[in-house]
Amino acid sequence: MDSDTEVKRILSVRKDDGHDRPEAPPSSYGSMKSDEEEEEDITETTESLARPEIPESIFGTTLLQLNRSDSPETLHTEFTQQQSLSARKHGAYITDSKSEDGLEEVEEGADEEDWDGCPPDSPEPPPIEEPEDQSVSDEQSEHSLLGQLHPELDLPYIFKAIQKALSQLTDAEMYQYKRSLCWRDQPFTLEQLEECDTLDVVDKIIEAYGRGEGLEIAIQTMHDIRKPELAEELTKTCKRALVQLSVKVVLKRKHGVIHEGIPKAGQQVNLRKVYTEPQISCCGHGGISPFHEFPGMPPPPVPQVACPDTFVRGNDIFRTPPGSGAVRTVLTTGIPGIGLTVAVQKFIMDWCNELANRDIQFIFKINFRELRVKKNHHMKPGQTVSFTDMLTYYYHDLNNTNLLAQPDFKALFILEGMDLYQSPLDFKATPVVSDITESVSLDSLLVNLIRGSLMPSSLVWVTGRRAATSQIPTEYLHKVYEIQGYSNELKEEFLTKRYTDKELAAQIISHLKLLPSLYDLCQMPFMCWMVSMIFERGFQNEDDYGDKPPKLTPFYVHHVIVQTNRRLEKYYDAPQNHQTWQETDREFLKKVGKMAFKLLEKGRPVFHEEDMKDYSLTLEEVAVYSGIVTELPPESNKRRTFSFIHYTFQEFMAALYVFMNFRAEGKNVLDQSRIISRLVKDRSMVDLLRSAIDRTLSAPFGRYEIFLRFLCGMAQRINSKDVLRGVFFEHDTPLVKGLEEAARLLQKRMESAEPERQANLEECFRELTQSDD
């Protein structure tokens, strides 16, 4: 008896028992037919890209249960009814989509505000809507008609393929199959499977393991019962789904966790538990915050801020407004520490978990740093490689699949960290290559992939620092996004989300707000994490921690140390966690500090390439590698413009330059008429501080206030002795003397200073004398 006849028989039996029941819905996996009809259906589905039509009656009010008691479609219908009734009481909008466990995925907060700006021709595949919900807006209705899943990746196709393979087993072989399933990891017992027919078994496999893993389990179990021919047939039929599963496994393993701070084995953090999505704008202005503690600062030109109506969600970067055409190549930039790498990880994990962009069949992430290593260490000079070989080098499951050459192949290639490649790409002179099997140079492959000559129907997402990505001609970029970081609300969300102890989270937030400059700097997720870790240890280990406001200088010192270590690791291939600073690294920081000091004297917050050359600096060293400088969008005259990632970093680097000269060479660069002898061991900080205070009080209010605060913080005993020595200075560099006398000088100047200056001098005194943090 075929499956459709069985359904009719069940219906007739239930009508005869005297109870009225609604008509049975069609199976959520498609109409149940004979083996020959199933084979025809699979063939037709493979040839057509149209998503199989799902009858509306499946989402009606029926709770009819067939003789398969735990059928996913029945669970799906009951679950949908319960969720819909509960959610509508609170005005929620429920979408329904097929997940791996056969149940609907409920997206929280999918109201009109959440979907604002999500255009109708976005690639997002359509969630299945509940027809009873009449409150769905027109925009949401259009959104539900967006992109489609490939039929070979959809649940009906996979279900039918497994059913067709199992139907070829004899009764004895089917019994062996059930026993093998139970022995695997015992998601169900043999007693539960003993009376199950083929449909029941497929139901339970999909329900227990999900769509992709269930397919793999079905194939492995066929090998277990020595039916390799059926396993091979099913593998061939569902090759696309199996390759997608293997790609997801690789991506989940790499991107499901993050290492915060110094990477240590076994100390990774689950991405989902700590991730807070930053603001992402489609109209970037450089990502520099214009905030400063003192009025009139920073000096013009003041950085512009992206408007809220330009913000998009991270999963929506490939969506387009109506009538604007398709988006193929997207560029995302941001200042160092803004969370670009983690944002890419979250995008990948949401795709792997089928929370977004489900119509993208595959995501292939290729790191520019890995390509640089391959090019410099694993390829001979002049050696060529084809695009197919390059991709299968990183994703072995693509071997012998021919998927890349198929016209319905839709993938996203993420080219992460263009600044890490270090070799310029010539978009003008590189010849056009459109054959994925043609062997060319690695540079040529990258250029043609970004151009669209290679894999024109696939999507490309390039990330990197603006100084490196600016080499891509604008005609090849359909969208450019800039990560803006955290707003004040997102900072608090990030800090609150990290801790189950909400009282501790509230203490950290309150303590952070005592220092406005640091609070603004937490726009960068990296700085927000650093603050949370330092404050957490303080509150947990010291009873009186938090009685005094935190100091500013240590956070900037550690930020520069971390960025320098990352520069050595990522751009100069230093071993992870074993970066050793050379004298050239200290000289580099001193040169950058000198440039920052001269710009501070001139009141200039931005600079150009010729300014770097004046201090023997290269554009790549400063704007790409340093981690404290970024490139701004080009001016109208197309002159390249640069800035520190925050104006306070320019003030910090200027103070660092002054202090490094005083500490290492015995020079007071603030007073050229006085040179402290290098041979004098008892160098008194009071001489340097007196010159800094005189300069600060004689300049317009705000010009040197933060600079003076940083200089006092660097001279503080713990910073000078333990933090800076061995990193910014050699271990045998003499210690700073005269700190007590310098503190008395500050107190004396506070008494005679103008009221508006007194508050900052008090902060300078605290930076010089306070010993916590």
Image: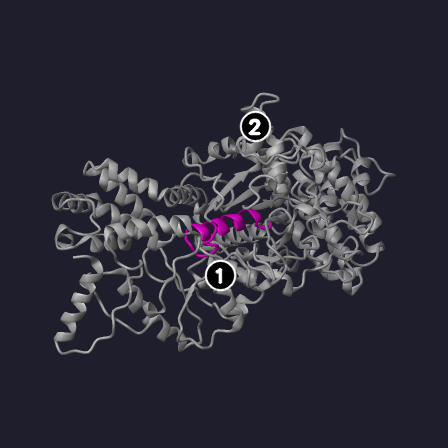
Residue 580: % across, % down: 58, 30
- Residue 69 is at least partly visible in this image: no
Residue 309: % across, % down: 64, 65
- Tell me what residue is drawn at x 65 percent, y 35 percent: 432
The crowding category of the residue bearing disc 2, from other C-alpha atoms within 10 Å (few below 14, some 14 to 19, many at least 20), is some
List the single residue furthest toward the top. Answer: 380
* Residue 280 in the image: above or below residue 88: above
Question: In terms of depth relative to the viewer, which is nearer, 539 or 758?
Answer: 539
Residue 454: % across, % down: 58, 39
Residue 450: % across, % down: 62, 41
Give residue 583's quadrant in the image.
top right
Question: In terms of depth relative to the viewer, which is nearer, 463 or 337?
Answer: 463
* Residue 496 in the image: above or below residue 582: below
The residue beneath circle 1 is 496
Q: Which mark is residue 439?
A: 2
Q: Is label 1 or label 2 in front?
A: 2
Q: Which mark is residue 743?
A: none
Q: Which residues are magenta?
A: 338-360
